[in-house]
Image (spheres, helix red, strand yellow):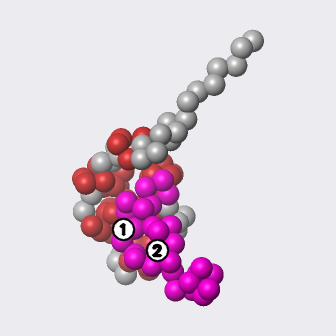
Amino acid sequence: MKQVVLNCPYRDPGRDPIAKTVRLDRLTGRERQVLLLLGSGMNNTELSGELQIAERTVKAHTARVLEKLELPSRLEAAVVSVLLHEALCEDPGCVRGGGEAEDSPASAA
């Protein structure tokens, strides 16, 4: 049987297939923060502590994120968060966003 080799959708530089299907512009600033933190694996209690809001508010924001992005589950939202981290993260010191965190080994050199 001949194996079919698929072309990687990320093959072309500057092409990001997931970014074109997820409309982050639909989210409020707080919803973007919640989505970003969902990618870290935090539970609702941890999210409420990090954002200093009530746990029920975290649940409401999460539900709106899922609805606005048309995602079926929190797990898929977490995957989107990881894939689109650079678009969501506003921390200039974030190593994933191209900056260097103060305590990173690269900044110590």
Image point (33%, 63%), residue name: 32
Boundaries of the magenta span: 82-109
Q: Position of residue 108 (x, y in %)?
A: 60, 87
Whether residue 55 is visible to the viewer of this picture, yes or no, is yes
Tag shown at residue 99: 2
The residue tagged 1 is: 33
Image point (63%, 81%), residue name: 105
Image point (48%, 48%), residue name: 76
Tag shown at residue 94: none
Q: Is residue 88 magenta?
A: yes
* Residue 29 image-quadrant placement: bottom left
Give the amino acid at mark 2.
Gly
Count of number-bearing discs: 2
Image height of 39 relative to 48, above or below: above
Magenta highlight: main SS = loop
Q: Nearer the viewer, mark 1 or mark 2?
A: 2
**What is the crowding at mark 2: few (fewer than 14 residues within 10 Å), some, or many (at least 20)?**
few
Looking at the image, residue 75 sits to the left or right of residue 68; the answer is right
- Real-space Cα separation, disc 1 to disc 2, in angstroms: 19 Å
Image height of 62 relative to 70, above or below: below
Element under label 1?
Answer: helix
